[in-house]
Image: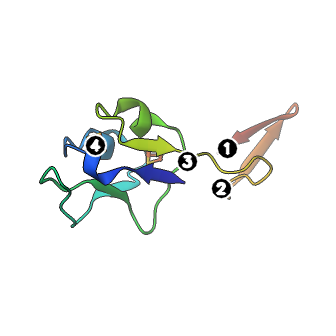
Amino acid sequence: MIEIIKDWCKGCEICVIRCPVDALEISAELNKRGVYPPKLKEENECNFCRLCELLCPDFAITVIPEEEGEPKETKSRLIIGGIVNEV
Ligand code: SF4
Ligand code: SF4
């Protein structure tokens, strides 16, 4: 889950540009600062890497990882020597 405090966003778009899986887009709703904050795309590939949270200069994003034991469904899994690699 991703929480975005919309009114803290200044619309720099760093999170949208830097998301490695293109999971974010600019919303159509103006915030109190007069800019359009980001939102998760309806169909998104967010992998909870936290890059957007770490890069946001205004601390507007908090990434909350999914519960342990409930891994996100991925296209395939390769298990090598007890280490699970997503491929
Ligand atoms: S947590 Fe990572 S994958 Fe998800 S929206 Fe942020 S940068 Fe993109
Ligand atoms: S990085 Fe932060 S301030 Fe910039 S658009 Fe994203 S949420 Fe807004």
Give the position of the N terminus as an image quadrant: bottom right
- Residue furthest to the left in view is 34
Q: Residue 61 in the image: state x and y as whole percent.
A: 40, 43
> Residue at point 12% right, 54% down?
34
Three-letter amino acid code of the residue under disc 2: Thr
Marks 3 and 2: which is nearer the front? 3
> Residue at point 28% right, 43% down?
17
Three-letter amino acid code of the residue under disc 1: Glu
From mark 1 to mark 2, how far is it between C-alphas?
7 Å
Three-letter amino acid code of the residue under disc 3: Asn
Q: Is mark 3 within 8 Å of ligand 1?
A: yes
Q: Residue 60 in the image: state x and y as whole percent.
A: 35, 42
Q: Which mark is residue 47?
A: 3
Three-letter amino acid code of the residue under disc 4: Ile
For numbered disc 3, what is the local secondary structure?
Answer: loop
Marks 4 and 2: which is nearer the front? 4
Q: Is residue 80 left or right of residue 49?
A: right
> Residue at point 25% right, 53% down?
37
Q: Nearer the viewer, residue 51 or 61?
A: 61
Q: Which residue is tagged 1?
A: 86
From mark 4 to mark 2, how far is it between C-alphas?
23 Å
Q: Earlier in the sequence, mark 3 or mark 2?
A: 3
Q: Are marks 1 and 2 in contact (CB under 8 Å)?
A: yes
Marks 4 and 1: which is nearer the front? 4
Q: Which residue is tagged 2?
A: 74
